[in-house]
Image: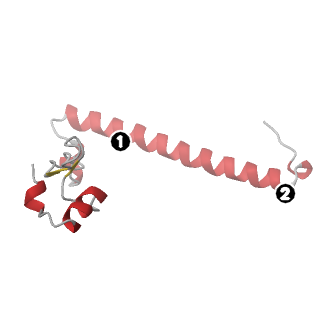
Amino acid sequence: MKVDLNSLSLKELKDLQSQVAKAIAGYEDRRKKEVLAELDEIAKAKGFSLAELTGIAAGRKRTPSVAKYANPANPADTWSGRGRKPRWFSEALAKGKKPEDLAI
């Protein structure tokens, strides 16, 4: 594939540069995944996991947090107590309710 770079405008050259950078990054990512898969197969054939051999722990999978509070107006609307307080929770506290009153 030959492209006459001298005949392209500055915008076209920059677009081409961006496309090339994305293609290179995508190629590198694909190659890394292929090599990791090959190494994982070799490790499994020898009775190990790749994480054991490299000393890198596998990523921790988080479980969703359990709901602790429910909206009195709509019990399906819940909050785990983590993160930003929902508006209904803040409004209930402003009206004099305690968090224990909203607990599930």
On-image quarter of the N terminus: top right
Residue at 12%, 62% in the rendered image? 99
Amino acid type at mark 1:
Leu
User: Residue pushed farthest right?
Assistant: 7
Q: CA gap, disc 2 to disc 1?
A: 39 Å
Residue drawn at x 18%, y 58% is: 81
Q: Nearer the viewer, residue 82 or 97?
A: 97
Image x and y of residue 79, in percent: 21, 52
Residue 12's label in the rendered image is: none
Question: What residue sits 20% from the left and 41% below the top?
Answer: 49
Q: Are marks 2 and 1 in contact (CB under 8 Å)?
A: no
Q: Is residue 7 above or below residue 1?
A: below
In this rendering, position of residue 38 left or right of residue 26 = left
Instruction: Please give the label number shown on residue 36.
Output: 1
Bin the neighbour count of mark 2 within 10 Å (Cα to Cα): few under 14, some 14-19, many 20 and up: few
Q: Which callout, 2 or 1, points to the residue nearer the camera?
A: 2
Residue under the point 16% across and 67% down: 96
Q: Which residue is mark 2?
A: 10
